[in-house]
Amino acid sequence: MTPITEVDGHRLALSNLDKVLYPATGFTKGEVLHYYATIADVLLPHLRDRPLSFLRYPDGPEGQVFFAKNVPPGTPDWVTTAEVPRSEGPARMVLVQDLASLMWAANLVTEFHTHQWLIQRPSHADRLVFDLDPGSPATVVDCCEVALWLRERLAEDGIEAYAKTSGSKGLHLLGAVHPTPSERVSEYAKELAVAAERALPRLAVHRMTKSLRPGKVFVDWSQNAARKTTATPYTLRARQEPTVSAPVTWDEVEACRSPGHLTFLATDIPPRLQDHGDLLSPLFDTADAARLP
């Protein structure tokens, strides 16, 4: 029998709570839901007003994994949705605005992926992002070196950078920017990715060509495009273990000497929040958002 739970006045049928989603650790769907309920206060501000893309893995990472942007069939009428412009025509997408809609979405077993812009102003980014993706045998340790270079370069333009793990192999850098057309943000990010490759030729590459990437860090600037999304801070990832895209301090980035130093599981996040709070909270201070040069 599927248990019915009431969240903020909305009834939710939370299914298959004992189902193991992460076989390597035995982490269950019930534990996934508990994780999201526990960290909702810090996750929700990063989701609110940003159309949500779902990377679903209802049978765990070894089962079917599929990406969806449109409102899923059976979405309750109390879940907020919005029309989003696309080149192929407008689409309707979900906005996770509150705890009830967060728990409904988590029950679908999904990674949360969001745009760099808010629904009030589509295609005008208020965040800049770099996805640093290591090509084997490079690791997140190499990503940290590239991240430190980018941090200094961004600071020259008045942009304060913040780091989080991807929850997979790499590292993400984020910065708050004054709402700017996504095309311009993409251009600026590409300029810095090219500069990183010139400054760190043995380490960084700005082109996606796979033959160029072994042993180097791909500085992916393309996720600033209006149509693209990036894993949301604090989302669980569809990996062998319940890894999280976790904010990290610059001290941790500088001190990283092995991939395990920047691998965080769901159980690590509540203690980190007690120690650090949300390390990405300055991104919400719009008064300090930089204007691109």
Image: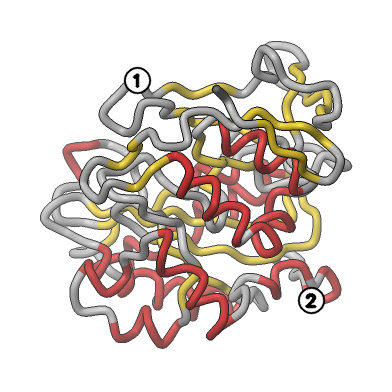
Residue 123 got which mark?
Answer: none
The residue that appears at 71% across and 54% down in the rendered structure is 44
Q: Nearer the viewer, residue 240 or 206?
A: 240
Can you give x and y, in whole percent of width and height, for residue 278 in the image?
62, 73
Three-letter amino acid code of the residue under disc 2: Asp
Look at label 1 and name its amino acid: Gln
Residue drawn where x is 72% and y is 20% of the image: 75
What's the residue at 79%, 72% (across, down)? 285
**Foreground: disc 1 or disc 2:** 1
**In the shown orientation, is residue 23 left or right of residue 175?**
left
Query: Residue at point 61% right, 23% down?
Result: 69
Any part of residue 123 in sight = no
User: Looking at the image, which is closer to me, 237 or 192?
Assistant: 237
In the figure, 201 relative to 101: above or below? below
Q: Is residue 26 left or right of residue 251?
A: left
**Residue 225, position in %: x, y?**
60, 39
Nearer-the-camera pick, 14 or 219: 14
> Looking at this rendering, what residue extends furthest in the front direction?
1
Query: Dot 1: what SS?
Result: loop
Quadrant that contains the C terminus: bottom right
Say which residue label 1 marks: 64
- Residue 159 in the image: above or below residue 115: below
Residue 151 visible within the image? yes
**SS at badge 2:** helix
Quadrant holding the N terminus: top right
Left or right of 193 on screen, residue 234 = right
Tell me the number on the disc at residue 288: 2
Q: CA distance from mark 1 to mark 2?
A: 42 Å
